[in-house]
Amino acid sequence: MFNNQEFYRSVFDLKDLPDDNLPEVIICGRSNVGKSSFINSLFNRTNLARTSSTPGKTRSLNYYLIDKNLFLVDLPGFGYAKISKKEREYWAKLIEGYLKSSKQKSLAIHLVDSRHKPTELDVHLNNLLQYHKIPYIVILSKIDKLKQSEIKQTISNTTAVFPELKYGENLMTYSSVKKTGKKEVLKLLSAMFYHF
Ligand SMILES: Nc1nc2c(ncn2[C@@H]2O[C@H](COP(=O)(O)OP(=O)(O)O)[C@@H](O)[C@H]2O)c(=O)[nH]1
Ligand SMILES: [Mg+2]
């Protein structure tokens, strides 16, 4: 289960969305929140998704094919300040066009940096997911950077902004470095896509 992962395609233009009608899991969140690291750590890969210390690098929807059965879609990390207005508009169009498309969006995994309260951009993304009726969970990323007491605080900060979230259900913590939360995420995905 989840033994086979391959890079499938980068989509810069909506006309290049794959024709295959496979279920899609969206990995989304602000630039630099840890999306690529999340994908790599989930599958014990070092370089399936490209990580970068320079924020704002991903300019495409990156498709990964898992077990020839489902797609993981790495959304461009919007919200990076140092890009032009034109580029920002291009991103917004690409993301919203994708969300509006007829693709089978089974789940969105919205990563929020555990060191910061959810930002306006996180609220915007949450609104988009709700508006397009895409089921979602929120994952607090880089949890290895926090002490136990800080983790409690960040969970309550997050549920204050997103009251629909419940820790352990649709709100989880994750560390790509320490692999915290990995088992839980894999369990959730296997329950969704593999029926025993
Ligand atoms: N300590 C720690 N650093 C992380 C974690 N996940 C990602 N990072 C770092 O955060 C930066 C951005 O990660 P990346 O996966 O490229 O973020 P993306 O822009 O959302 O795809 C990189 O320097 C990563 O090494 C994590 O769980 N713990
Ligand atoms: Mg990335």
Image: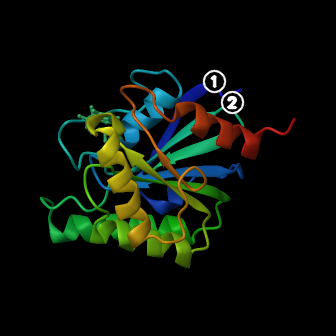
What quarter of the picture does the C terminus occupy?
top right
- SS category of the residue bearing label 1: loop
* Residue 81 figure quarter: bottom left
Q: Position of residue 20 (x, y in %)?
A: 69, 49
132 lies above or below 185: below
Left or right: residue 57 compared with residue 111: left
Left or right: residue 140 compared with residue 104: left
* Residue 106 figure quarter: bottom right
Residue in front for this viewpoint, 109 or 81: 109
**Contact, mark 2 vs mark 1 (Cβ under 8 Å):** yes
How was this image coloured? Answer: rainbow
Q: Residue at x 61, y 73 (%)?
A: 133
Q: Is residue 75 visible?
A: no
Q: Position of residue 91 (x, y in %)?
A: 33, 64
Q: Amino acid at mark 1?
A: Asn
Residue position marked by numbered label 1 in the rendering: 4
Q: Position of residue 170 (x, y in %)?
A: 57, 56
Residue position marked by numbered label 2 in the rendering: 67
Left or right: residue 45 compared with residue 54: right
Residue in front for this viewpoint, 150 or 41: 150
Q: Is mark 1 within 8 Å of ligand 2?
A: no
Q: Position of residue 14 (x, y in %)?
A: 49, 61
